[in-house]
Image: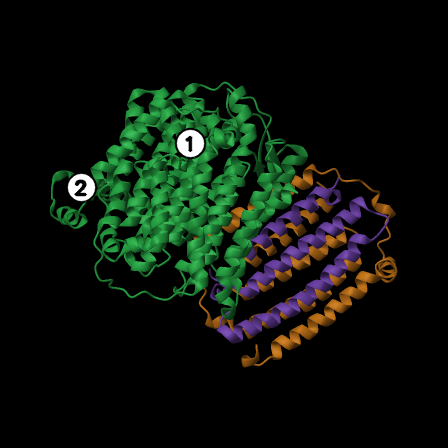
Chain colours: A purple, B green, C orange
């Protein structure tokens, strides 16, 4: 059986993408870098959907449709997030999340 | 019918109090009328009630409403009970009916007299209000069907006594006296209350009727019964001014004289003896208790009589006399005869209140309490008060055929059977009684009248009547009541109370006659010339006199105890409360909580990623738990 | 190990390398470029999964639009003025730990689950099929997503054009 025909390999990749995305989310100080990590996470979810669609649910195209939605929503989200980034930069002259700590205590 | 009458008796005084309190200023003048009128109503109702049950049938009757019941087994190994219950209600039986008649009639006469006595006082309304409230409380005490209810009214009576003793509160002496009375009463009531609690725990009820049954049928260890009896007796000691709690009664004379007549001779102080008779079964169940009661009564009787012999103040003489007579009553009960005690209580109530009202008449007339001054002011010219005084004192000394003779004789007889010592004590007390009574009489009679310093003030004929009628009535009753205990009236009272008929014991008759003659002669020789006697009184500094004048130093003992012991203890506890309870328990706890809160709030660093990390940690926990649950492999 | 497998492994490696670089490199511009690499890899993986339409969508929208927008944002925030501070080791450790645990746990969970197996050849993954289901079975989510897009645009406009003192 080819590797590309086994569900587990796709699981491995998507889990790895998820892990890396979370790592970036928790570690990076730059707001745009956090956004990039978020994109990774979304992609891992899409990959999961499509893989499961192919291997477990073959009579409908639910996974792909869902992925289309994910892409659309990702676009919307990036749009809003970027406007917030610009706004934060205007306010604080930096997009370092550690500078935005007004909720302290 | 019964219940209506009972409610009338109980609530008329309360109604009077409420009306007087709530009256608008304009109508305040009618306050005395309201008080007197409703007191009359109560008195008539109780007479009617008595007449309904005169044949003694259908008693005891209880009108009760259950208050609460707890159903559980007894807390105590010796006793079998099913449930704990408290009720409220009226009890009607022979003892009650007699007592309520005494109380309401004397109350009415005192209220009537107060109209005369307090005619010039500005705070008349307040006086009559409190007096009525006292009636309400006293009636409640007499008519109640269980110990707890009695205790409630007991405390209320103590409260009204405080209010009335301190009626002229601007006088520091009066305020102090009121406080002293209340505090001592409260102290004694502590024991009383403990006794009630203990009774409730043991028997599950404090109903008089049920308690009677219980004490008879259950077998408790003697020590328990003794303790119970003694605890309840401490309440009696407080209320009835027994040694060493008697110190409040002489000071209570700071209040208006009618108050002394009502409360401190006839009703409130009698409540203690009433309780003794009411719960007699409890006391009689232990010989030790009875002995203690006997001893305390003896001490009281002697102390009162002795101290009465050196007083200048007419009210103080009567006050100590009351103490002494109460002691006699208590002795009678301690010797085993509640009947003798109650009989003497009845006669004493009438002639003592008569005596106090007489004193009130003198005081009102001459504006002084001092017997020598009254005498010099022309006391013997006031015929009605003088006659009443003579009658009252004769009764007190036990002269035949006045009331006191029969009841005192009965007590002497009971004590003689009990033991020689106690009989001897009672003889001594009787002698002293005659002595101080004669002293009072002779001082007033034999003093030459000097110029009257105070002009006679004119009173309205209404107040004159209201001042005189009670004296006459009480005087008459004093005579009749005594005769009720003899074959003349078929031993009515004694049969009523359940005692046996006594015939005049010749030996006792001789003894008392001898006492009377002896005492009177002694006083006569000493006070033939009152002026001389007064001089000697002032100059004599002998040890006996000094001891007696300092009231046997008992008050000083109390003072010492309070200052050194009680106050020190109080300040110690205060320090403890501030330092420990406040400092440690309260303050430290709050600092602790604040500190923990502050430490915990460090989680909120303000950094987004820290929050994310926490969220992820939680999520991971759930994830691993799910894996563990679903497969057991990790 | 067939040729298909080798290709697959290469593509997977490219994806993961891109992802790793996207989070690890300090220069945020490099991160964006690595993201693009990663997305290309994901598109290739979609082709492996018979989702050609999706692969094209991925390239056009994700790489062509979203990543470009990200690069716009990077440029507008002037990254070359900021000296990136040294990495905080505690943060590094705890993030690495958390993500490693997540990775492990998730993989284990996925491995343990019993997945139903279906015949891969029977699916209708053509564009026509997707289009039809978008407008019939999944019409509601489709419309909702359009609504979301609209709101997102409006929101972004509002936020970005608000004056300093009115925020």
C39 to the left or right of B542: right
Q: Which residue is denoted by mark 1 in the rendering?
A: B341
Q: Are marks 1 and 2 in contact (CB under 8 Å)?
A: no
Position of residue B488 relative to residue B11, above or below, is: above
Chain for disc number 1: B
Q: Where is residue C61 in the image (x, y as percent from the top left)?
A: 72, 66
In the rendered image, the vertical position of residue B600 relative to residue B493, given as above or below: below
Quick one: B547 or C132, which is closer to the camera? B547
Q: Is mark 1 on a helix, strand or loop?
A: helix
Name the spot of residue A30 as percent of width and height, x first.
52, 64
Q: Where is residue B170 in the image (x, y as percent from the top left)?
A: 32, 61
Residue B182 visible, this angle? no
Residue closest to the eye, B477 or C98: B477
x, y percentage for residue B153? 48, 44
Residue that carries the numbered disc 2 in the rendered image: B526
To which quarter of the image does residue C51 belong? bottom right
Q: Residue at x 32, y 45 (%)?
A: B318
Viewer-nearest of labels 1 and 2?
A: 2
């Amino acid at each position: 059986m080819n590797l590309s025909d086994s569900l587990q390999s796709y699981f491995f990749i998507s889990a790895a993408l998820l892990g890396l995305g979370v790592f970036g989310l928790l570690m990076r100080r730059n707001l745009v870098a956090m956004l990039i990590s978020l994109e990774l996470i979304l992609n891992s979810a899409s990959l999961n959907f499509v893989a499961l669609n192919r291997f477990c649910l073959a009579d409908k195209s639910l996974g792909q449709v869902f992925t289309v939605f994910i892409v659309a929503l990702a676009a919307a989200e990036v749009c809003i997030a970027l406007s917030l980034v610009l706004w934060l930069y205007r306010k604080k002259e930096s997009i370092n999340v550690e500078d935005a700590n007004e909720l302290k205590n | 019918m019964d219940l209506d009458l009972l409610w009338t008796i109980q609530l008329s005084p309360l109604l009077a109090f409420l009306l007087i309190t709530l009256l608008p200023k304009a109508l305040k003048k009618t306050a005395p009328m309201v008080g007197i009128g409703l007191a009359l109503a109560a008195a008539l109702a109780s007479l009617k009630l008595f007449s309904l049950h005169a044949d003694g049938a259908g008693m005891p009757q209880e009108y009760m409403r259950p208050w609460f019941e707890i159903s559980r087994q007894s807390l105590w190994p010796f006793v079998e009970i099913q449930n704990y219950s408290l009720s409220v209600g009226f009890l009607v039986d022979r003892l009650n009916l007699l007592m309520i008649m005494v109380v309401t009639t004397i109350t009415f006469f005192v209220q009537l007299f107060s109209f005369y006595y307090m005619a010039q006082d500005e705070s008349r309304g307040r006086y009559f209000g409190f007096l009525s409230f006292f009636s309400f409380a006293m009636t409640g005490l007499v008519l109640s069907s269980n110990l707890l209810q009695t205790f409630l009214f007991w405390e209320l009576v103590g409260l009204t006594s405080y209010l009335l003793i301190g009626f002229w509160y601007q006088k520091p002496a009066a305020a102090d006296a009121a406080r002293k009375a209340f505090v001592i009463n409260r102290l004694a009531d502590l024991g009383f209350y403990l006794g009630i609690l203990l009774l409730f725990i043991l028997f599950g009820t404090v109903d008089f009727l049920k308690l009677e049954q219980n004490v008879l049928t259950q077998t408790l260890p003697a020590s328990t019964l003794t303790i119970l009896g003694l605890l309840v007796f401490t309440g009696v000691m407080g209320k009835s001014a027994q040694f060493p709690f008697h110190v409040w009664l002489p000071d209570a004379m700071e209040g208006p004289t009618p108050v002394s007549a009502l409360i401190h001779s006839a009703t409130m102080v009698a409540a203690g003896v009433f309780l003794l008779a009411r719960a007699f079964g409890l006391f009689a169940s232990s010989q030790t208790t009875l002995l203690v009661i006997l001893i305390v009564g003896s001490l009281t009787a002697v102390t009162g009589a002795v101290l009465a012999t050196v007083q200048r103040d007419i009210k103080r003489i009567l006050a100590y006399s009351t103490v002494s007579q109460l002691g006699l009553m208590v002795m009678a009960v301690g010797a085993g005869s509640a009947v003798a005690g109650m009989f003497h209580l009845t006669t004493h109530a009438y002639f003592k209140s008569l005596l106090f009202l007489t004193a009130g008449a003198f005081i009102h007339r001459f504006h002084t309490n001092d017997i020598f001054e009254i005498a010099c002011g022309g006391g013997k010219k006031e015929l009605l008060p003088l006659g009443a005084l003579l009658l009252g004192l004769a009764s007190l000394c036990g002269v035949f055929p006045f009331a006191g003779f029969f009841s005192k004789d009965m007590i002497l007889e009971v004590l003689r059977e009990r033991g020689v010592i106690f009989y001897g004590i009672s003889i001594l007390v009787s002698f002293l009684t005659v002595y101080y009574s004669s002293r009072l009489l002779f001082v007033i009679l034999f003093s030459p009248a000097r110029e009257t310093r105070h002009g006679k003030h004119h009173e309205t004929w209404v107040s004159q009547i209201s001042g005189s009628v009670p004296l006459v009535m009480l005087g008459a009753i004093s005579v009749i009541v005594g005769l009720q205990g003899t074959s003349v009236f078929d031993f009515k009272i004694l049969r009523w109370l359940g005692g046996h008929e006594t015939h005049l014991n010749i030996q006792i008759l001789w003894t008392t006659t001898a006492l009377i003659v002896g005492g009177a002669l002694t006083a006569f020789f000493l006070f033939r010339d009152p002026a001389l006697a007064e001089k000697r009184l002032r100059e004599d500094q002998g040890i006996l006199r000094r001891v007696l004048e300092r009231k046997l130093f008992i008050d000083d003992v109390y003072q010492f105890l309070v200052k050194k012991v009680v106050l020190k203890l109080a300040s110690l506890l205060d320090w403890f409360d501030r330092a420990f309870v406040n400092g440690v328990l309260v303050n430290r706890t709050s600092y602790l909580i604040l500190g923990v809160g502050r430490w915990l709030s460090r989680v909120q660093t303000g950094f987004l990623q820290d929050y994310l990390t926490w969220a992820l940690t939680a999520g991971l926990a759930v994830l691993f738990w799910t894996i563990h649950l679903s497969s057991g492999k990790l | 190990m067939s040729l298909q497998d080798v290709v697959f492994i290469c593509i997977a490696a490219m994806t993961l390398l891109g992802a790793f670089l996207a989070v690890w490199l300090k220069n945020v511009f490099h991160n964006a470029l690595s993201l693009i690499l990663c997305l290309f890899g994901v598109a290739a993986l979609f082709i492996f999964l018979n989702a050609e339409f999706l692969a094209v969508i991925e390239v056009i929208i994700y790489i062509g639009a979203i990543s470009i927008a990200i690069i716009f944002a990077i440029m507008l925030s002037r990254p070359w003025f900021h000296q990136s501070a040294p990495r905080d080791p505690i943060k590094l450790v705890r993030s690495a730990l958390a993500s490693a645990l997540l990775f492990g746990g998730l993989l284990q969970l996925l491995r343990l689950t019993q997945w139903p197996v279906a015949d891969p050849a029977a699916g209708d993954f053509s564009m026509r099929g997707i289009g039809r289901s978008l407008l019939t079975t999944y019409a509601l989510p489709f419309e909702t997503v359009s609504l979301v897009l609209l709101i997102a645009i409006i929101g972004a406009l509002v936020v970005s054009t608000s004056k300093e003192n009115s925020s």
